[in-house]
Amino acid sequence: MQLKSQPGNRGNILRKRLKNGIPDARDCGSHWETLGGRTRGQTNDSPPHQDLKGGKRAIDLGEGSELIYVPRFLPQHRSWTLFDYLNREIPGPGPPSASLAGLASRLASPLPRDTCYIADQGLPELQYSGYKPTAHSWGDYPPLKDILEAVLEALPGSSFNSLLLNRYKGGSDYVAWHSDDEKLYGPAPEIASVSLGCERDFLLRKKKPTRAAPYGKHLGRKKASQLGTCNSELSFHTKSMALETAQENCLDQHSLVLKHGSLLAMRGFTQRDWLHSIPKRAKAGSIRINLTFRQVQI
């Protein structure tokens, strides 16, 4: 299905939003300022990146993890046409899992965004955080098939058979720190994400390595005359660990702003070694729609 811009209807849509008190993603104000691949800490420690054709950037996170970012993946007119279509067609929150544990999880922590799941026929059911979304076919939302083909063209050699769509209604909608390292995606999954509407911060941080038990855990019973020395050594060791942790947190956290119409791909061991999130932002007062493509292992 060919996406076509309908400028005549856009004014009606905008007037309807304003009448209903719904802010429009085109009026994000200062939130449209691009931060790029900003690293917290010294700028010299920013991950190396390579600028490719069309603004496409390859960002090497090290140890087999890589990001691909295309800020101008979709033309503006096509991005807004797709945004309007999806914002109109996306259903509300899906039904909770039939299990008691799933129902309890959803009641205790409602999903902070609307979702819609599209997948090839025959794939395993998706279930997470007490949710079990209904799997729609690509034929239910024809424009999404076109976007899938565009993503595959931009990422040669990639393969995707499912799509999880999220709608963030404002700055209070978010995604907590997590990694998509479930077994159904394989050991080194590639995940591609298309952003539409209001720009939001994308945060990335390195997973903490498994550490041995801190010095002092295995002191056992010490004579009273030895306790002073042990406490002194433990205090010094604890301060050293705290300084080391602070340095790691500074160097291994990155952020960028996901632009309207952009494409972000996480490759290699990014899910194994890194966590990512979309945090709450008070100034993000309008709607963002995100399309996340994954390959489910059969």
Image: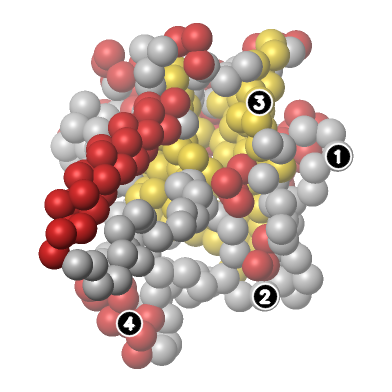
**Residue at image mark 1:** 157
Q: Nearer the viewer, residue 8 or 222?
A: 222
Say which label, 3 or 1, has the lower sequence index: 3
**Residue at image mark 2:** 124
Q: Secondary structure at mark 1?
A: loop
Q: Label 2 is placed on what type of residue?
A: Pro
Q: Nearer the viewer, residue 186 or 147?
A: 186
Q: Label 3 is placed on what type of residue?
A: Asp
x, y percentage for residue 12? 34, 30
Q: Determine whether, in the image, residue 171 is placed left or right of residue 75.
A: left
Q: Label 4 is placed on what type of residue?
A: Leu
**Residue at image mark 4:** 103
x, y percentage for residue 131? 42, 72
* Distance (Cα) linking label 1 and label 4: 39 Å
**Residue 126 lies in what quarter of the image?**
bottom right
Q: Secondary structure at mark 4?
A: helix
Image position of 8 with respect to 252: above or below: above
Rate crowding at label 1 as few (under 14), some (14 to 19) or many (20 or more) other CA atoms within 10 Å.
Answer: few
Determine which of the numbered discs, if any, sits on residue 177 in the image: none
**Residue at image mark 3:** 60
Is there any visible trace of residue 41 in the rendered image?
yes
Farthest residue, direction right: 157
Residue at 35% from the left image edge and 66% from the top image edge = 218
Say which label, 3 or 2, has the lower sequence index: 3
Please say if the residues under marks 2 and 1 sit with CB atoms less than 8 Å apart: no
Q: Secondary structure at mark 2?
A: loop
* Disc nearest the viewer among 3 and 2: 3
